[in-house]
Image (cartoon, rainbow, N blue to C red):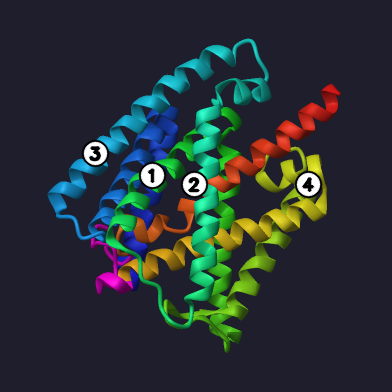
Amino acid sequence: MLKQRVITAIILLAVLIASYLAGPVVFAGVMAIGFGLAQWEWLRLAGLSNMVSGAVALIVTGSSALLAFLVYQDIQVLSQAASQYQVLYANLSTLFVLYLAVIALLWVGIAIQVFFARHSGMKVARPIVGVTAVFFAPAAWLSFVAMYGALGITMVISLLMIVWVADIMAYFTGMAFGKNRMAPAISPKKSWEGVAGGMLSVILLGLLAYWIAPDVQTVPSVIIEKSGYIAWIVIAFVLVSLSIVGDLFESALKRQAGIKDSSNLLPGHGGFYDRLDAMMPTLPAGFLVVSIVMANAAAAVAG
């Protein structure tokens, strides 16, 4: 099992590196495939057949990819004469921001539901499972593309690092000190000690990254530089909390469907949704937060 996990992880890493080196369009396209497959798995949890789930995921992902490509072309033209901030604001339509804001608020609603259902179990109606799959997965991918296209790869990686560090450190902290189960009826192995370890690790790593390399543009550096240390602590808390909610929500859906993994496409890891579940709420929320912080800072300078 461990051998499979390592081999699969190496292959995925190689594909991601190669696609990044091939250029932004290829990189975004590879990520679109990953999120599209995650959406397919998500739709299957709603009880849809493989064929129907695949057709819906293909249509939604294809439409999102076409939209993102057209926006990317505009960004490339504007970036020749505008700063990255102007590019960001010029290409974030009101509709797109509203879409992400609604998705982020819905994730907050899910977080509240998960919290109160952690001891009794969480049931989600199949139509709701399908609707969330259709709208939540593209929101995450489009947020990834928007942040990557407007602000660069270091911003994207730093946002993903928040998810990865929280997950890894929560696992090891929970293994070492975990006694109080966080959501025994949804994901029995998760503990409050693990959550605290993951949260603290993200906050400290963000501070350390800013102190060591303040000139490298990352999520913590932008937030600390524009809004201060307290803002970073609060935002890190929110983003880590949402990453946990994304994980728990998928766990609830799988438990409801009576399966362990969303698929077997990634040997040793389960499915693509298993790997991307925590990113589904974190990417839209993180991109919105960074946009708001930068917009406020720009307005203050202009004022």
Q: Tell me the distance, in whole angstroms, between the alpha carbons under discs 3 and 2.
A: 21 Å
Q: Which residue is nearer to you in this view: 166 or 45?
A: 45
Element under disc 2: helix
Q: Quadrant of residue 170?
A: bottom right
* Image disc number at residue 58: 3
Counting from the top left corner in percent of width and height, residue 278 is at 47, 58
Element under disc 4: helix
Q: Tell me the distance, in whole angstroms, between the alpha carbons under discs 1 and 4.
A: 31 Å
Q: Which residue is nearer to you in this view: 26 or 83?
A: 83
Q: Which residues are magenta?
A: 255-269
Residue 214 visible, this orientation: yes
Which residue corresponds to the image point at 50% horizontal and 53% vertical from the top-left? Answer: 106
Q: Tell me the distance, in whole angstroms, between the alpha carbons under discs 2 and 1.
A: 8 Å
The label nearer to you, 1 versus 4, is 1
Q: Are marks 2 and 1 in contact (CB under 8 Å)?
A: yes
Which residue corresponds to the image point at 69% horizontal and 67% vertical from the top-left? Answer: 200
The label nearer to you, 3 versus 2, is 2
- Give the residue type that dot 3 points to: Leu
